[in-house]
Amino acid sequence: MPKVTAFTAGRRNGTTETLTKIALEAIAAMGIDVELIRLNECDLHPCSACGNGPCHSKGPAACIWKDDGAWLNEKFLDSDGYILAAPVWSLSPCGIVTDFRDRVFGPKMDMAMWEMNGGSPEWAKGRRKQRPGGLICAGGALSEHWTSLGMPTLYTTTFSAQTNVVDNLNLYACGDAGEVFLRPEVVRRAKYLGQNVGHAVLNPQIDWENRWLGSDNDGEACPGCHLSLVIAKPNRNYVECAVCGRKGYISLDENGKMKFNWPVDNQNRLTMMGKFDHAREINLHGEIRSQQGGPEIDEQVKKYRQMEQWTVKAPSRTKKKAEKKED
Ligand SMILES: Cc1cc2nc3c(=O)[nH]c(=O)nc-3n(C[C@H](O)[C@H](O)[C@H](O)COP(=O)(O)O)c2cc1C
């Protein structure tokens, strides 16, 4: 039986979790196994960025942090589709989401890198697949612009694993969970999101890369991620989607309204081709550094490594050292 795993970062029984349960209920009704994991109840240390560390070669179980990180990675790899849901805090998803992203996804889960290095790593145990997903983001403020970085960040959380988001639900003006039920259109959209993810999971023969099942009532700017967060710089006639990275040409119609034209762009980072491009870019960066090194550079590195006179240790670290001495 296929399985959809939902990772939620909101409060227990809060708005985000309630919307996720509505979506899961619709998925379960389609005969799909469902699971809900509360990220806030997981023990998850931030990634230490030990470079091409043990998690790359031996897999997440070899991570230096013996917490729930490896278990979360297994849960994702065991799923056929996923939901990621989070409340907005200070315009972005709450902090546990970025720890989840850095510990569970990131370069070690980059499918383009897997392919360029001879296929899936052994630790993935053949579970290489493009999983369809749905994203839910809920902000409390009364205007949408207070949620500006929420949904874009949810896309970046899982995208290294070449997930295909088929629907997203960005909500604002969310009070407590009860308020969800005062807005029947919201309950309906959460249910539709579940059905869209369920449909994609039940039809793996369809290539879900760049396919969209959600609504587009607001006419979002980017046809790839269905969001409108664009980078607009002076003296350019194009904008860049901050999520996909693709270029869109901008013009004004006779009423002075903005129009976008997005040609097919292989650098779209939501596709495998975009990820190949990125992997090649990273490799090139490493080559430049190894070719241009030398004693002068090593001296500079040493100088700043030794510069510790202004560093202040956190009280918890000082306490731990004192305790060790006492032992
Ligand atoms: C620290 C903090 C920061 C917040 N910042 C924002 C914000 O920038 N924009 C917004 O719309 N809501 C903000 N909120 C409100 C939450 O997004 C809102 O209460 C949310 O619906 C809670 O979801 P939950 O019930 O699933 O936990 C913030 C809440 C907290 C606790």
Image (cartoon, rainbow, N blue to C red):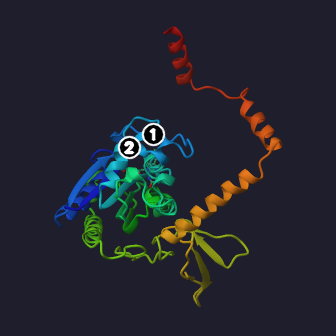
Answer with the quarter of the image where residue 234 lies.
bottom right
Question: 319 or 184, which is in the foreground?
Answer: 319
Left or right, residue 274 beside residue 175: right
Q: Please say if the residues under marks 2 and 1 sit with CB atoms less than 8 Å apart.
A: yes
- Determine the residue located farthest toward the bottom in the rendered image: 254
**What secondary structure is found at the residue carrying circle 2?**
helix
What's the CA distance linking mark 2 and mark 1? 8 Å
Question: 169 or 314, which is in the foreground?
Answer: 314
Give the residue displayed 33% in from the left and 45% down from the top. Answer: 11
Q: Which residue position holds label 2?
A: 70
> Label 2 crowding class (10 Å Cα cut-off): few <14, some 14-19, many 20+?
many
> Label 1 crowding class (10 Å Cα cut-off): few <14, some 14-19, many 20+?
some
In what quadrant of the picture does the N terminus appear?
bottom left
Asked if residue 10 can be seen in this view, the reply is: no
Give the residue displayed 50% in from the left and 75% down from the top. Answer: 222
Asked if residue 255 can be seen in this view, the reply is: yes
Type of amino acid under label 2 = Ala
Residue 238 coordinates in the image, percent (x, y): 64, 77
- Determine the residue located farthest toward the top in the rendered image: 326
Residue 223 coordinates in the image, percent (x, y): 47, 77
Residue 284 position (above or below residue 261): above
Residue 295 coordinates in the image, percent (x, y): 81, 41
Q: Which residue position holds label 1?
A: 63
Q: How many marks overall?
A: 2
